[in-house]
Image (tube, grey):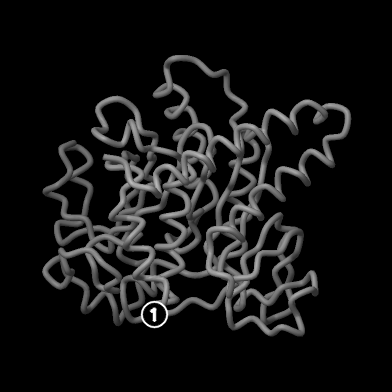
Amino acid sequence: MTHDLHDYIEQLGTKMDAEYRRIRKSASQDPGTAGDEGEENWAELLRDWLPPAYQVVTKGQLLSSDGSLSPQIDVLVLKPSYPRALHHRKKYLVAGVAAAFECKLTLKRDHIIKSVQTAARVKRMARPSDGTPYRELSVQPVFGILAHSGGWKRSDDVEATIETIDEILNYADVAHVKHPREMLDLLCISNLATWVTSKQPLSDPADQIDLRVRSKLDPKGSPATSYMCHFGEKGFGDAISTFKPVGVFISELLVKLAWEDSALRNIAGYFLDVEFSTAASGKVRYWPRSIYSPQLRRKLKLSSLNQNIGWGEWDSSLE
C-alpha cells in the first residue's frame, strides 16, 4: 500500500522531469538562463519541503570567521537563527548556513569532482567540534549536489550508470577529502538516484569479508565512511514501486539537519518510516584512528557504541 507522501513525491518527481525537458529546449541558446532556471527549481523544492523558518536563497558565498570566502554557491539554506538584517547580503556567515548546494541541469564528471572539492573547502571553513564520534566526524553546513539529469547515456543497464558515478564520486573523495567531516553529504539526480553519506565511528573488522582488506584493519575497529546509493533497482523490494530520488533526498536532508535542530526529528523520523527506499549500497573507505582527538581515541571502543540507530552521538552508524 502506498502512502499519500509517496503520491506527493511522485508528483514532485514528474514536475522536475517536466521542468528539465522544458529548460533543455533553450539551454543551448542561453545556457546561463537555463542554469538559473534549474537552480530556481531546486530552491523552490527546498522552500516547499523545509519548514518556513529555514530561508532558502540563491547565489552567495560563505564567509568564515577569519574573513575567507568560499566560491559562489548556487543555493543556500539559512538556519532559523540567521540574523534577519543579513538575509539579503550575498556573503553568508558560515555558522548560520544549515545547507549549501551546487545545482546542475545535466550533471557531468567534472561537476562531481569540483563539488567534492568545494564541499571539503566549505567544511574546513566551519569550526569543528570534539568529544563524541558525531561531533568529530561531522560539521555543518550540509553540502550537496542537485541535478535534474546526468550526462551519461541512458540505457536499460541502470546499474552500469550507477557504477560509473560511484567510481567518480569515490575517486574525488580519495583525492580531495582529508577527513570524514569534509565529505560531500548528498548527491541527488532527480531522474536516477540519490547518494547519502554514511559514517561508522568504528567498523568491526570481523564484518569485512575480504580477508586481504581485513588483515590491514585495526583489530579494535577502524573508522569507515561510504556514499550509499539509493536507486530503487530490482531486488530492492517494495522500493521499486515507491522509490523516487527526490523522496530520498528530502528525507535524508531532514535527517542531517535534525542532528543540529532537534525540532526536526519527529518529521524526519516520519519520512524515514514512510520509506522512499528500503536498501542502498556503497564502497567503504577506511580511516586511521588518528582522525580522532586523543581524548576520544582513549574512550572509543566497539563496545562503547550504541547499536540502536537514532540521533545518538555514540551510535554505531551516523547519517
The residue positioned 14% from the left and 47% from the top of the image is 207
The reply, left or right, for residue 43 in relation to residue 191 is right
Instruction: Answer above or below: position of 232 versus 140.
Output: above
Callout 1, which amino acid? Asp
Instruction: Answer above or below: position of 33 versus 161.
Output: below
The residue positioned 39% from the left and 24% from the top of the image is 159
- Secondary structure beneath label 1: loop
Determine the image quadrant of residue 153.
top right
Determine the image quadrant of residue 12.
top right
Q: Is residue 170 visible?
A: no
Residue 154 on image: x %, y %: 54, 19
Residue 199 on image: x %, y %: 33, 57
Residue extending farthest to the top is 156
Residue 151 on image: x %, y %: 62, 27
Residue extending farthest to the right is 29
Q: Which residue is mark 1?
A: 130
Residue 21 on image: x %, y %: 68, 28
Q: Nearer the viewer, residue 24 or 292?
A: 24
Instruction: Answer above or below: position of 210 versus 134.
Output: above
Image quadrant occupied by the N terminus = top left
The residue positioned 16% from the left and 55% from the top of the image is 204
